[in-house]
């Protein structure tokens, strides 16, 4: 078994980390995975500073993961920061603070984010001879791609995400018809950028919104990435989950079997975004993936 390596994805809504190792010729195997909802992108206006609480909680999550990685024997942590760090005035401050915690953090473009997510998804769920589509919904951006192999033929990053839409809709509880109309308008304005042919491919949905919906669909008492990974979700079932989430106030959503307690407030917005993208692309079914950007970062430690 190789020495452990550690990767970190500092997103707009959550911080997800992976500590992994592998045999001489075997695939990477997770030794430990972590996910903390920190809301780094809470209330962010482009060019403005991070929300102080979001930055504090994000740095605490980074520090805790770096400590866990060291305890596992990993030498340092390689990480990336995405949409919130791209937009914030003090993205460099985040990078500097992470460096003091032993984490080499890089702010990446939406295009690079899509490439990392694609590589992880193709390795995990791609099928030779069959096109694959990708939908990666984050807190403030969504990455889409289509193709075959380790490099997609087309990819795009859209300024849409579960937290961004939740805030744009006024954070109504339960979600209102007016909030839905605002969200639908924002989504429709980006629909022309969807990669052609997405609906006819095997569509993989990755990241927190998709996996949270998978856990809800499976009514998991505790989140189990192994059960969510590869879980099929038809567009009809996605629509049913969306309608259920939109009909309930937060207090009742929190009581649903399988609900992610820390994502329950923004999950209706995330579900609407995923559903509308499937409708726009003509995708009838999804395959859920628990292996996103943090898994794509393993390429930096060799093929």
Image (tube, grey):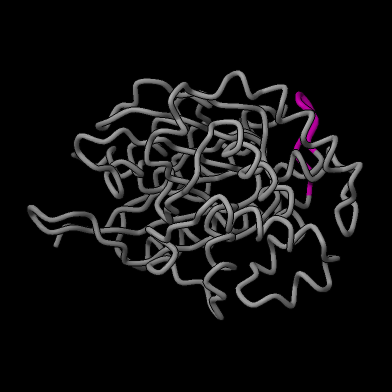
Nearest the viewer among 268 and 140 is 268
Nearest the viewer among 75 and 148 is 148
The segment highlighted magenta reads 44-52
Residue at left offset 79%, top offset 29%: 185
Q: Position of residue 219 (x, y in %)?
A: 57, 75
Q: What is the quadrant of residue 85 in the picture?
A: top right
- Hey, which residue is sitting farthest bottom in the picture? 221
Nearest the viewer among 298 and 196 is 196
Is 293 located above or below residue 191 in the figure?
A: below
Nearest the viewer among 31 and 235 is 235
Is 184 located above or below residue 234 in the figure?
A: above
Q: Position of residue 171 (x, y in %)?
A: 87, 49
Is 243 located above or below residue 192 in the figure?
A: below
Residue at left offset 43%, top offset 47%: 292
Which quarter of the rendered picture does the C terminus lie within? top left
Q: Is residue 205 magenta?
A: no
Q: Does 137 sit left or right of 26 as displayed?
A: right
Q: What secondary structure is the magenta-colored segment mainly?
A: loop
Q: Position of residue 229 (x, y in %)?
A: 40, 60
Q: What is the quadrant of residue 121 in the picture?
A: top left
């Amino acid at each position: 078994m190789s020495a452990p390596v550690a990767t970190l994805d500092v997103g707009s809504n959550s911080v997800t980390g992976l500590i992994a190792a592998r045999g001489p010729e075997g695939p990477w195997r997770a030794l430990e995975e972590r996910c903390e909802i920190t809301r780094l992108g809470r209330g962010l206006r482009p060019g403005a500073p991070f929300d102080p609480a979001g930055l504090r909680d994000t740095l605490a999550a980074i520090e805790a993961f770096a400590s866990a990685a060291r305890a596992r024997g990993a030498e340092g942590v390689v990480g990336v920061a995405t949409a919130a760090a791209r937009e914030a005035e003090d993205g460099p401050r985040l990078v500097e603070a992470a460096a003091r915690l032993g984490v080499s953090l890089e702010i990446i473009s939406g295009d690079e984010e899509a490439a990392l997510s694609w590589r992880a998804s193709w390795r995990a769920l791609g099928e030779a001879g069959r096109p694959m589509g990708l939908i990666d919904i984050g807190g403030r951006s969504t990455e889409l791609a289509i193709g075959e192999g380790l490099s997609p033929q087309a990819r795009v990053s859209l300024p849409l995400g579960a937290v961004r839409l939740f805030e744009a809709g006024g954070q109504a509880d339960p979600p209102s018809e007016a909030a839905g109309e605002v969200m639908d308008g924002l989504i429709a304005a980006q629909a022309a950028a969807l990669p052609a042919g997405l609906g006819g491919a095997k569509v993989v949905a990755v990241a927190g919104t998709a996996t949270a919906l998978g856990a809800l669909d499976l009514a998991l008492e505790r989140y189990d990435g192994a059960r969510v990974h590869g879980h099929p979700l038809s567009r009809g079932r996605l629509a049913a989950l969306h309608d259920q989430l939109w009909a309930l106030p937060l207090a009742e959503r929190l009581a649903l079997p399988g609900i992610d307690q820390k994502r329950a407030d923004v999950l209706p917005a995330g579900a609407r975004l995923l559903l509308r993208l499937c409708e726009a692309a003509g995708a009838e079914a999804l395959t859920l993936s628990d292996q996103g950007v943090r898994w794509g970062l393993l390429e930096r430690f060799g093929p």
